Image (spheres, rainbow, N blue to C red):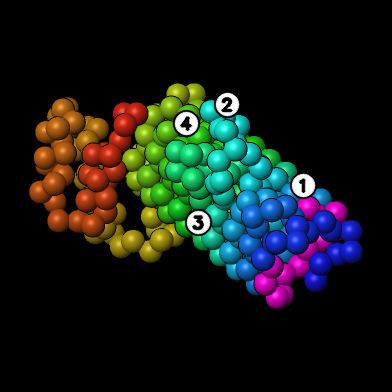
Amino acid sequence: MIHQTAVVDKNAAIEDNVEIGPYVVIGPGVTIKSGTKIHGQSVIEYAAIGHNCEIFNFSSIGKRPQDLKYQGEKTEVVVGDGTTIRECVTLNRGTAASGKTIVGKNCLLMSCSHVAHDCIIGDNVIVGYATGLAGHVEVGDNAIFSGSVGVHQFCKIGKSAMLSGGSIIVMDVIPFVIAQGDRAVLSGLNLVGLKRQKLNLSEIDEIKNAYKILFMSKLGLEDALARLQEIESVHVKEIVEFIKKSQRGLARP
């Protein structure tokens, strides 16, 4: 159902069973899959919206990136199935650097949050109220951002990490940890998140051991990584691979 006051570009590809509310503006380059609901006064352009998403009032999705180098290249936003975007969220499309800003499946972007150009957000991520992700930030699956978190451009946030309210993230945050503070530091493992994901005690112990080797053993990073590579654990291997790809350095305890 498309409300009579909505303005929809003639080339927009909108599947059946999509609900578009009053005064919504659907601009060029938009595809919307079935089961999605868009509340009033939202603006969407150059975006691919998945199945069963819900986009609340006054959200702005796919507008041009806030990057002075952008010269009108054809780029887009991709939003995965089942994602909820609450009121007044801004989600900018990509630049020529990657061509896309991506939000995964079953995410929740709370009111007034901002996802900038070329970000890549995994599945089941929660972005809290008034949190801002600068350009080119990468976020692993199941990460949680509390309210008013600020993330510096090009930072990487690991799988199942939790960023505490008001934190300022300027370095990469490894998977499975909690980070907090202005120029955030690590304050331990995200044990609640790990238990919610049904990791068993032996898996959690492996992650605890990796954390101790990295940050409490007094080993240099290269030596610590060499120790971690000897451990047969999927989760520890994920930490190792994350660290190897880090470009901004690691947040530490």
**Mark 3: which amino acid?**
Gly
Residue at 16% x, 28% y: name it. Answer: 220
What's the distance in space between the residues labelled 4 and 2, CA to CA?
Answer: 15 Å
- The outermost residue toward the right is 4
Numbered label attached to residue 34: none
* Residue 54 at x, y percent in the picture: 68, 61
In the rendered image, the vertical position of residue 236 relative to residue 70, given as above or below: below
Looking at the rendered image, the disc whose residue lies closer to the viewer, 3 or 2, is 2
On the rendered structure, is 57 left or right of 204? right
**Mark 4: which amino acid?**
Gln
| In the foreground, 4 or 27 | 27
The secondary element bearing badge 1 is classed as loop
Q: Check if mark 1's residue and mark 2's residue have beta carbons within 8 Å.
A: no
The secondary element bearing badge 4 is classed as loop
Q: Main secondary structure of the magenta part?
A: loop
What's the distance in space between the residues labelled 3 and 2, CA to CA?
Answer: 26 Å
Numbered label attached to residue 153: 4
**Mark 1: which amino acid?**
Phe
Q: What segment is highlighted magenta in the picture?
A: 14-25
- The first of marks 1 and 3 along the sequence is 1
For label 2, the residue is 68
Q: Quadrant of residue 235?
A: bottom left
- The first of marks 1 and 4 along the sequence is 1
